[in-house]
Structures are given as structure tokens and as C-alpha cells.
Image: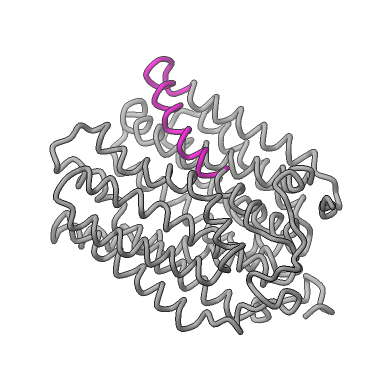
């Protein structure tokens, strides 16, 4: 494989374990897609306020941020495979217990435990992907892994509507079953032999060179990947997720169904371009792919701010999907390039935390801006954030080198 160029390399050349991880990601995303619409409804069923019910969602993301450094330590101490399996089991058990919760406090606690398990799973899974994938296939490996999430996220809500008709508790049990299946797949198919690195013979090998967080931030590529992850979490999973549904129904005065059409259009556009974009990042380079994604993201944000019509909204969401195809795979591949042959945990954990933190802060900023200044102010903030991301990407050298590790 090492004698192949990026243009010659094919997906079939990827290690089997990465295909297994894609299956696992599909199971997890399918389960989450089933349960996600139910979470605030189930919270409200305990007689709490709408704000309190929303904390059931926030605490999951908050625990992912808080626990990411601990997940990184687990990877360095017990290895990726065990951390991944333990995380999946924790998500499965906590989901089942959430469905059995008798009080709001119990539900909140179990969702927090699920956030911890989710962090363990995502950090360790990405660590495996970027470690096992050859450099010339790394972006496509990340794309294949994340395509499992995308497909699962598309089908999950449709199945969730049927499951929700059974009861408010039923989706939690389906989520528990899906993550239990993922844990079983991991236990059976992710053997140590399949996840071994020819250069790193043990998940916890003592001879790996240490790579500190500061070493990552000395690298222009890692800084760009970190910034793009934070901007994406803030603008896509924060500002847009919180403000766009209200914008469509309250300012454009369109039916709520248009919200769903826009989000589906975005996911469809991303899915269509996912693998071509990741191949482009492998063949043409990380920086060109990041530039394309960042420029498209700015265009999408500009349309949402400057074209306040149904057509402007739908076009903006479609273009956002194209941007996401480049920016959901290439930053992870860059991080993989930086941590290659090193202890991966801290830099991967910080990279995940950037996106999660943006997703936590974004809705709060969106709510504050809408209440006090209107929707245009929210979209202006989003445009400003995407421009910051573009500037940081432009600062990447054309041929970034791996960071030096302090002795």
C-alpha cells in the first residue's frame, strides 16, 4: 500500500477494521436518530418546564466536553478497543435505564452517563480510524466512517416516528438495542490483530513518542482543523439548529415542514458529495479541500443573511451540505496526519471538544440574539464565525509538516 499514490489508492485498500467501524457508527447514529426527537418530549412528561426539559439534551453534550480528556487518558492506558467497547456499553445501559426512569432527576443522570460513554466511543473510534488508515487514504477513511453516521441519521428519525407511536419510552430501548448491537460488532469483529498497527504493536505501547496539546497547536494544520471544528459546531449545530426553525416559521411565515425539507436537502447534498470530497482531500491535498469547504460555508452563511426568502433558505441549506462534505472529513484527516505515530488521545480529545463546545454555546448565543436583536443578527454572527474559519485556513502552509515533539 505504501508504494501507491493517493490517486491510485482505493477504498478496498482500507483495513477491514475501518469498514467495521463504519458499521458501528451506522448502528449508533440509527439509534440516536430514533431517540433524539423523543428526548425533550419525555423530559416534559415529568411536568418540568421547557427549559428544564432542554437540559436533558444539553447535559449529554456537556458531558461529552467534560469527559473528553478522560477518554483520551483511557485510550493511552487501556487502548482504543477497550475504551470503544466500554463507551458503547455505557451508552446502551444508560439509554435502557433512561427509558425506565421514574423521575426527571433519574433521566438527567442517565443522559449524563450516556454523554460520558459517547465521548469514550467517539474519541477512541476516530483514534482507530486515523491510526489505521494510510496517509494517502486517510480522508476517505474518515469519510467512510462518518458516512455510517450520516446514513444512520437519515433513517433514524423516520423509524423513530413509528417507534414513538408505541410510547415515549420505547425509543430509548431501541437506542439501547442499537448501541448494544454496535458493542457486539466491536467485540466480535474488532480483534486486536485487525486493529494492530505494524509500526505500533500495542494499543498502549510504551515506546510511542509523546505528543502534547501544545505541540498540536504549534502546527498550522491542527490549528485550522480545530478552528473549523469549533466554527462548525457553533454555526451548524448551534446557531442554525436553534435559530433556523424559528426563522422559517416566524419570519418567513412558512410551514414547519419547510424546516424539515431544508435540513433533509442539506443532508442529501452532503451525502452525495461526501466521498468525492474526501478523495479530493487525499489526492489534491488537505489545504485545497479545506479552502473549498470554508469558502462554500461563507457563501451559505451570506445567502441566509442576505436572501430572506424560501428560495434563499433552501439554497443556503443545500450549499451548506456541500461545505459539510469537505469540512466534516478533511479536518479529521489533518488531525490524523499530525498525530501519526504518536499518542493520539489529547489532540483527538481537544478536537472533539472544539465541536462540542461550539454546539453548546451556539444555541445560547442564538437564543440571546433572537430575543434582543432579531434573526439577522444571529446570521451575521454566523457569517463572522465562518469568515474567521476561512482566515485561519488561509494561514495554513501549502505543504504543512508534522510538529516537532519536545524532548
Whether 232 is drawn above or below 267: the answer is: above
How many numbered circles does the render carry?
Answer: 0
Q: How is the image coloured?
A: one colour
Is residue 3 found left or right of 217 in the rendered image? right
Name the residue: 72% across, 58% down. Answer: 339
Quadrant where the N terminus is found in the figure: bottom right
- Secondary structure predominantly adopted by residues drawn in magenta: helix
Dividing the picture into quadrants, the one containing residue 10 is bottom right
Residue at figure coordinates x 29%, y 47% from the top left: 109
At 36% across and 53% down in the image, what residue appears?
A: 113
| Percent x, y of residue 132 | 67, 72
Q: Residue at x 74, y 48 (%)?
A: 216
Residue 371: x and y in percent read: 37, 19
Task: Please indicate whether residue 403 sits to the left or right of residue 243 in the image.
Answer: right
> Would residue 348 be found to the left or right of residue 176 on screen?
right
Q: Reply yes or no: does residue 24 show up in magenta.
A: no
Work out whether residue 400 can be spotted: no
**Which range of residues does the magenta coloring cover?**
354-376
Residue 374 in magenta stretch: yes
Foreground residue among 50 and 183: 183
Q: Is residue 38 above or below residue 159?
A: above
Q: Quadrant of residue 191?
A: bottom right
Q: Which percent across, then down, holds residue 199?
A: 76, 75
In the image shown, does 256 or 374 lie closer to the viewer?
A: 374
Q: Is residue 188 visible?
A: yes
Specify whether 219 is left or right of 44: right
- Tell which of 88 and 399 is nearer to you: 88
- Percent x, y for residue 349? 58, 51
Amino acid at each position: 500500500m505504501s508504494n501507491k499514490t493517493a490517486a491510485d489508492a482505493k477504498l478496498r485498500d482500507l483495513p477491514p477494521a475501518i469498514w467495521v467501524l463504519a458499521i458501528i457508527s451506522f448502528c449508533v447514529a440509527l439509534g440516536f436518530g430514533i431517540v433524539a426527537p423523543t428526548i425533550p418530549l419525555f423530559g416534559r412528561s415529568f411536568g418540568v418546564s421547557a427549559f428544564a426539559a432542554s437540559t436533558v439534551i444539553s447535559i449529554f453534550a456537556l458531558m461529552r466536553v467534560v469527559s473528553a480528556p478522560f477518554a483520551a487518558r483511557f485510550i493511552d492506558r487501556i487502548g482504543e478497543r477497550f475504551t470503544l467497547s466500554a463507551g458503547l456499553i455505557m451508552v446502551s445501559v444508560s439509554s435502557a435505564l433512561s427509558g425506565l426512569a421514574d423521575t426527571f432527576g433519574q433521566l438527567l443522570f442517565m443522559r449524563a452517563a450516556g454523554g460520558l460513554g459517547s465521548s469514550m466511543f467517539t474519541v477512541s473510534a476516530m483514534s482507530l480510524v486515523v491510526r489505521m488508515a494510510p496517509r494517502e487514504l486517510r480522508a476517505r477513511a474518515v469519510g467512510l466512517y462518518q458516512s455510517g453516521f450520516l446514513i444512520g441519521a437519515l433513517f433514524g428519525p423516520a423509524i423513530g416516528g413509528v417507534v414513538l407511536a408505541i410510547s415515549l419510552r420505547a425509543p430509548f430501548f431501541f437506542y439501547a438495542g442499537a448501541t448494544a448491537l454496535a458493542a457486539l460488532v466491536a467485540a466480535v469483529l474488532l480483534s486486536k490483530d485487525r486493529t494492530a498497527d505494524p509500526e505500533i504493536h500495542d494499543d498502549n505501547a510504551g515506546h510511542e513518542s509523546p505528543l502534547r496539546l501544545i505541540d498540536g497547536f504549534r502546527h498550522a494544520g491542527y490549528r485550522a482543523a480545530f478552528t473549523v471544528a469549533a466554527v462548525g459546531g457553533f454555526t451548524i449545530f448551534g446557531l442554525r439548529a436553534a435559530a433556523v426553525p424559528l426563522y422559517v416559521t416566524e419570519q418567513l411565515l412558512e410551514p414547519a415542514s419547510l424546516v424539515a425539507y431544508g435540513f433533509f436537502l442539506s443532508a442529501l447534498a452532503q451525502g452525495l458529495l461526501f466521498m468525492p470530497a474526501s478523495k479530493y482531500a487525499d489526492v489534491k491535498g488537505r489545504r485545497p479541500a479545506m479552502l473549498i469547504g470554508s469558502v462554500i460555508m461563507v457563501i451559505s452563511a451570506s445567502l441566509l443573511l442576505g436572501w430572506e426568502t424560501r428560495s434563499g433558505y433552501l439554497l443556503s441549506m443545500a450549499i451548506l451540505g456541500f461545505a459539510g462534505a469537505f469540512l466534516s472529513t478533511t479536518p479529521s484527516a489533518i488531525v490524523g496526519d499530525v498525530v501519526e505515530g504518536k499518542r493520539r488521545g489529547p489532540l483527538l480529545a481537544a478536537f472533539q471538544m472544539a465541536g462540542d463546545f461550539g454546539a453548546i454555546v451556539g444555541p445560547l448565543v442564538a437564543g440571546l440574539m433572537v430575543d434582543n436583536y432579531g434573526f439577522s443578527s444571529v446570521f451575521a454572527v454566523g457569517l463572522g464565525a465562518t469568515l474567521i474559519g476561512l482566515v485561519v485556513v488561509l494561514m495554513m502552509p501549502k505543504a504543512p509538516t508534522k510538529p516537532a515533539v519536545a524532548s
